[in-house]
Image (cartoon, rainbow, N blue to C red):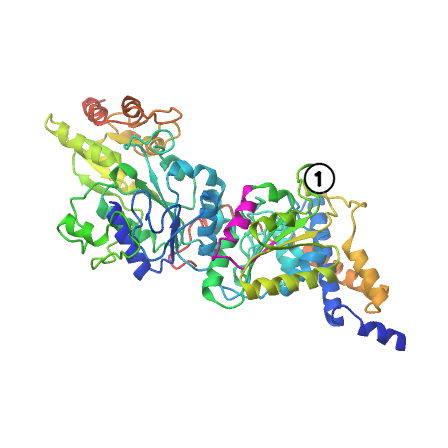
Amino acid sequence: MAQAIRMALHYAEEHLGVTDIFGEDVGPPLGGVFTVTQGLSTAWNTPLDERGIVGMAMGLAFAGQRPVAEIQFCDYAFNTMDLLKLAGQMCWMCNGDWNLPMVLKTPVGAGIRGSIYHSHSFDAVATHLPGWRVVMPSTPLDAYGLMISACQEANPVMFLEPKALLRVRGDEPIPGEPADPRALSKMIDAPLGDRSGWRPQWPALSAYAVPIGKGKVVRPGGQLTVVSYGRMLPLCAKAADDVAAEGVDAEVIDLRTLAPYDWDLVKASIEKTGRALFVNEDTEVTNFGEHLVRRAVDELFYRLLAPPRLLAGKAVPGVGLADNLERASVPQPPEIAAAMRELAALAP
Amino acid sequence: MAQLVRIRDELPLPRDLLVRLHDLMVQARALEERLISMYKSGHGYFWIGGPGEEAFSVPLGLLMKKGQGPAYDFLHAHYRQSGTILALGEDPVGALRQMKNTASDPYSGGRNFGGHYSIRRLNVVPVTSTIEVQYLMAPGTALAQKRHGGDAITIVTGGDAGTAEGDFASCLLWTTRPGQELPVLIVVTNNQWGISTPAATVHATRNLSDRGKAFGMRTKTIDGNDPIASYQELAEAMAYVRKERRPFLLEAKVSRLYGHSSASGANLVAEEQDCLRGYEAKLERYGVLDREQMDAVRVRHAEALAQAARAVIEEPQPSPDSIWDHVFAPKDGG
């Protein structure tokens, strides 16, 4: 997925007018702590100042540039909160006088034993900031396509990168990507050691775009609707396959965009199955999935066969480092499968 | 007569500019006083503004390179900047509309407090109630201007209290990165107060502008109550930033004539130095305007604003369903 985002950003700086890709250690020689920005011609290193980074993005966007800014981990975005609020409200508060075409990307979530300051989720916070588009891919191809769309938006887009998936290879190739992953690596991954003379060899890429606001059914089913995104999505898909052998027929939806989310897709599925399970790894109190539960109850109450359910991270202050602590803090495959079984068994 | 001509020859600025400065300062003062009056008579929920800063804010606006986009100056203002906005040529009726939060408010459609301007066609980015974020956004517009070429600069203004925020230090740092300096005129209007907290209890630095010295930045502290000195110092500082493409930190000592905002009563503080009174005394001494002429200017603006306000208070409020407008910009940015 890191390579996919990198290729999308390359396409965007070549063809979509992206002028600046910046953040802490985003430029050469490192190219990002997850290598997402290696070899990009407009990538540059900023001071270690998250508020300065977001302010720079806003200023560039005011002046007609198209910035892509990075906060190295979303855990470090909390001190930018009023700027995120301001970016989201800018167009509204001046009654449409200005708009901010900017992308803010940041790795989110647990799964890499990142301890307390590298494991936080941001979806609940991000969806409390009206005026932002919020996207979160679960596959490299979607990551590519969502970044292409983000770089064409007239509004601020928060691109949440599920960090545990950044090293995952997708089943669907990026258009133009060589079939052999070693060949791609040789073309666009920076070498170890001295990189001063290195230049990437980009494959011939295209403007493959995933529209913002459109979810996707990744596994059709008739008995139960499972809605997820980001790192939890592949776990849900795997769990759905596992419980299928037991006769549980789950439909799995990848939301892909959290704001504005694809309610039509979710609603149609719940109307079909009568059962809904929402899964994400953010802390469960005032969780984005809670909103979806509320909406399902409000709008679909008489179509439901069972109470909609949320499976999310525990409402504790952080994700602890020890393996047992991390596993106990965010949903794990057995819990997801168990929730599917339990929900499928419920009937009025 | 010969005596008068001799004095005119020694005028510190061209006569028509002195008159223009005066006219705009009076208009800005009359506007703020009209806004306060609207607030006190129930035609606004809150007042905050810049009476007492006209001697600095008006020259700033007159010296800006007006236009839209990176070829022109950007202004990241705070909420005491009406004098600058009027000097840029804005019709003061817009400020009245914002105070009355009418649907016709050109800066926010009835959504924001008075003094919170937004004028895209003049590169005036939206003013916010936060006192520091503008210092973070200014380097961004300046980077675009440096990249664009030409002599356009970014101007960012804030008060002395706001310099306590880390964002002010961020601005000093981001505009002076070695080899990547940015054309920003960083302004602090120092009125010696943060609402009710005296600056003397907060800042150990002798001058706030001294903070720029650690960043190798040109700095100066000036008398912002003197419009002539302000004009000359601003012209020099702006010329430096335009030419050298480097930042300049300018601190202007100003007055706060009506307190922090309506939250503290919005009443005249007699102990504060009134820049307009001092300037009018000078103009009389120079023989540029006499008392009668200056009184006429005051009456003209006050009456025009009173008349405009009478019309504005009859204008409709925004419709309830307009809350959904402009949450997002259209694809092309609108």
Q: Position of residue A64 (x, y in %)?
A: 44, 60
B171 drawn magenta: yes
Quarter of the picture containing the N terminus of chain A is: top left
Position in image of residue B35 (x %, y %): 69, 50
Q: How many marks?
A: 1
Q: Nearer the viewer, residue B277 or A243?
A: B277
Nearest the viewer among A164 and A47 is A47
Chain to which the residue tagged by mark 1 belongs: B
* Residue B146 sits above or below residue A336 on the image: below
Q: Quadrant of residue B81?
A: bottom right
- In reply to whether residue B281 is colored magenta, the answer given is no
* Left or right relative to B307: residue A242: left
Give neighbour class at mark 1: few <14, some 14-19, many 20+ (Cα, 10 Å).
Answer: few
Q: Residue furthest bottom?
A: B2
The residue to which callout 1 is attached is B200
> Quick one: which residue is furthest to the left in this view?
A245
* The image quarter in which residue B196 lies: top right
**Residue A246 on image: x %, y %:** 11, 25
- Relative to B334, is B93 on the left or the right? right
Splitting the image into 4 quarters, where does residue B193 fall?
top right
Quadrant for the C terminus of chain A in the image: top left
- Please name the amino acid that badge 1 sits on: Ala
Against B314, residue A169 (above or below) is above
**Residue B92 visible (yes or no):** no
- Residue A76 lies left or right of residue A12; in this view the side is right
* Residue A285: image location, x then y, percent: 38, 27
Rendered residue at 78%/52% (across/down): B274
Q: Which region of the structure is painted magenta?
A: B166-186
Q: Is residue B180 left or right of residue B1?
A: left
**Residue at image coords 42%, 39%:** A77
Q: Secondary structure at mark 1?
A: helix
Residue drawn at 19 percent across, 40 percent down: A218
